[in-house]
Amino acid sequence: MTLGKVTGAPRDLKVSEELTLTLYPLRSLHWGVIEEWMRSSIIVSAKEVIKGDNALTQTSKEAIMKTAHKTATQVALMSCFGIGTEDESTNALLRSFEGMLRVIHQAVRTSSAKDSTPLYTLIELDEKIGANLKMLADVFLEVISVSFPDVSEKDKAELEKNLKNTE
């Protein structure tokens, strides 16, 4: 294991000829930002469904929102890393283009301080990576490697296999 992995130091990753990203290890609070986005995505989606459907009764609307809130409270990123009960909605959100981009966004920081801010806005980072899904997945896997240096090669291979199932 390299000294950078042991110390949790950032890692420079040359993504393309024009782009090198400095990736900082994600801490619990960074993952919390991702979980909060996942939870709110579920609730916002449910709100959009009931907002646009005038045929739904008030009871149906309440049932949809209750289900959305219940699903949102069950979102736990730990399940994506093999801890706890596997949750397909959490895995799907993390494997989405936006999910991976948001994880990378949290890793592209201005410093290693726990309260440092991302170097780019989410939109700027999206523009830099573009629609290159392979590049996105490669950077995402590098963030995982930086954040969890003790993850076994078997687990990394499993994560990579799961990501490639989305292509």
Image (spheres, grey):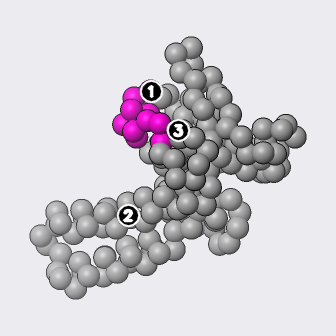
User: Overall secondary structure of the magenta stretch?
Assistant: helix
How many numbered marks are there?
A: 3
Three-letter code for the amino acid on which mark 1 is drawn: Lys
Location of residue 54 (image quadrant) = bottom left
Residue at image location 68% in from the left, 72% down from the top: 84
Residue at image location 83% in from the left, 38% down from the top: 3
Tell me whether the residue at label 2 lies in contact with that at label 3, contact meaning CB atoms closer than 8 angstroms: no
Q: Nearer the viewer, residue 123 or 162?
A: 123
Give above or below for 130 relative to 76. above
Give the residue at the far top of this rendering.
17
Q: Is residue 56 left or right of residue 7?
A: left
What numbered label is drawn on residue 110? 3
Tag 3's secondary structure? loop
Give the class, few, some or many, for how many residues have Cα within 10 Å of label 1's Cα (few <14, many ≥20): some
Q: Tell me which segment is drawn in magenta.
A: 118-128
Residue underneath mark 1: 128
